[in-house]
Amino acid sequence: MKTPHNSALQRWKQSQISLKRRYSGPLTAWFLLGAAVLAGCAASPPQSAPRIDTNALLTGTALLGSPIDIATLPEDGALTLSPEMRAYLAQISPGAGGDARLQALLRAFLNREFVVEYDAQETLTAEETYRQQKGNCMAFTLMMVAMARALGADASFNQVEVPPVWDHDEARTFVVYRHINMVSENVRGRRVVDFNLAAYDPLYDQRKLSDIEALAQYYSNRGLELMQEGDQENAFRYMRKALDLKPGSADLWANLGALYSRNRLFDLAEQGYQQALVLDSGHAIALSNLERLYRNAQRNELADYYAGRSRYHRERNPYFLYYQARNAYEHGDYRSARKQLKRALWQHENDHRFHFLMGLTSYRLGDYDDSRTHLSQAFSLAENAGTRQAYSRKLDVLRDGK
């Protein structure tokens, strides 16, 4: 299908033209100024960033041998229901309201009347997920959103900002994955439908996604899977489709950069990462990949610069500090753990995990009053009953081991 003239990508290109008109000088110069302001005390780059040729990145000529034909971009019908699915849904509490029917559908899933097994490497459409009985969080959510809407219930995509978990290919190039689930709202409140609801924590920041944003993530995830399977041409088609839907996403440009890096097109990989930084100057994965790219090319000044920027942003990320603290705690370095936890709590004081680990750390250091304070706060903040039970078991083990 040809891209309409008023597509998101077309509007994004027009915004870039407008941006160039508003600022005198080249766009790269404006980017470097913005990076210097947003990075705070980070050092200035040892040389100018490369010119970003988004047209070269998006046509795929270097990878495909000729420019991509927009008509060949995938249209997977990710939210389409099969006749089999529609027949099954027709049996779910017929005549009841949408919310009651959704509740009945969820009971059916819990009772394994239909089954989906978790498979992190399978980004599938709603119909494929139902038929193959497997999929990752994106696949499961696509299926549940499509089914819930067919039942007449409210259903939206929801991105959960879990502490960052990165994946990488054998070339040590990081790529971006996001956790996604479904939310349904009615007059009685908000229902979360998550593949692993026991591990879901409402404390995490989250935001609703439009269907376009969710589908852009679907196409990007599928592109990454194809890249790892060695199908580089179709990997590009899927990533290009993702950017056609959401050209302002730094994640998608970083993943496109990873595809070019995987194919040893390092100049284009560099530009993909730099475009991600234009959109998000603190994009952790773009920064890390640029450091690796420049280090492998023995451009050590630039590698050091991006390593410094990456470190600057990581050390201001409370979750990064928490994981550093947890590592120190597990190695018996309780003073270092407490130092990192103080910094994490100063930035984000309402995470029960930070308080619980601080309680354990203070206990190990013999500061029992501080330990009681933080453990009490952890139990108060942990809304999930399973989390509170897990904390109780850990405390029993700690007391028995003293």
Image (tube, helix red, strand yellow):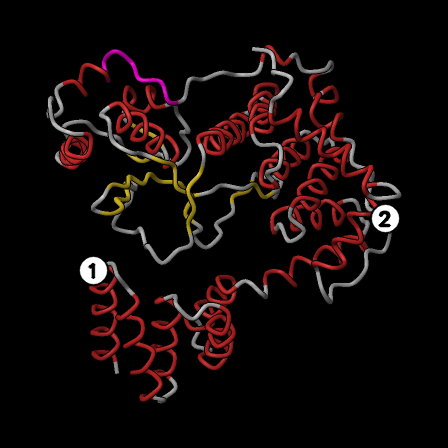
Q: Looking at the picture, how far across and down is residue 39, in whole percent?
A: 70, 60
Asked if residue 69 is positioned above or below residue 224 in the image, the reply reads: above
Q: Looking at the picture, how far across and down is residue 330, in whole percent?
A: 41, 70
Residue 385 bears which disc, if any?
A: 1
Residue 91 within the segment the image draws in magenta: no
Question: Which residue is depicted at the point 29% across and 14% down?
Answer: 82
Residue furthest to the front in view is 187
Question: Which residue is depicted at the point 20% across and 46% down?
Answer: 188
Give, as a three-letter code, the residue at label 2.
Ser
In the picture, which quadrant includes the C terminus? bottom left
Q: Which residue is mark 2?
A: 48
Q: Quadrant of residue 130?
A: top left
Name the secondary structure under disc 1: helix
Is residue 92 rendered to the left or right of residue 349? left
Question: Which residue is depicted at the point 22% across and 25% down?
Answer: 151
Asked if residue 127 is positioned above or below residue 207 in the image, the reply reads: above
Q: Nearer the viewer, residue 188 or 287?
A: 188
Asked if residue 363 is positioned above or below residue 203 in the image, the reply reads: below
Give, as a three-letter code, the residue at label 1.
Ala
Name the secondary structure under disc 2: loop
Label 2: few (<14), some (14–19) or many (≥20) C-alpha neighbours in 10 Å: few
Q: Quadrant of residue 147?
A: top left
Which is nearer the N-term, disc 1 or disc 2?
A: 2
Magenta stretch? 79-85
- Pointers 1 and 2 in contact (C-beta within 8 Å): no
Question: Which residue is depicted at the point 39% across and 68% down?
Answer: 350
Q: Nearer the viewer, residue 221 or 335?
A: 221
Label 1: few (<14), some (14–19) or many (≥20) C-alpha neighbours in 10 Å: few
Residue 138 bears which disc, if any?
A: none
Q: Looking at the picture, how far across and down is residue 365, in whole percent?
A: 39, 86
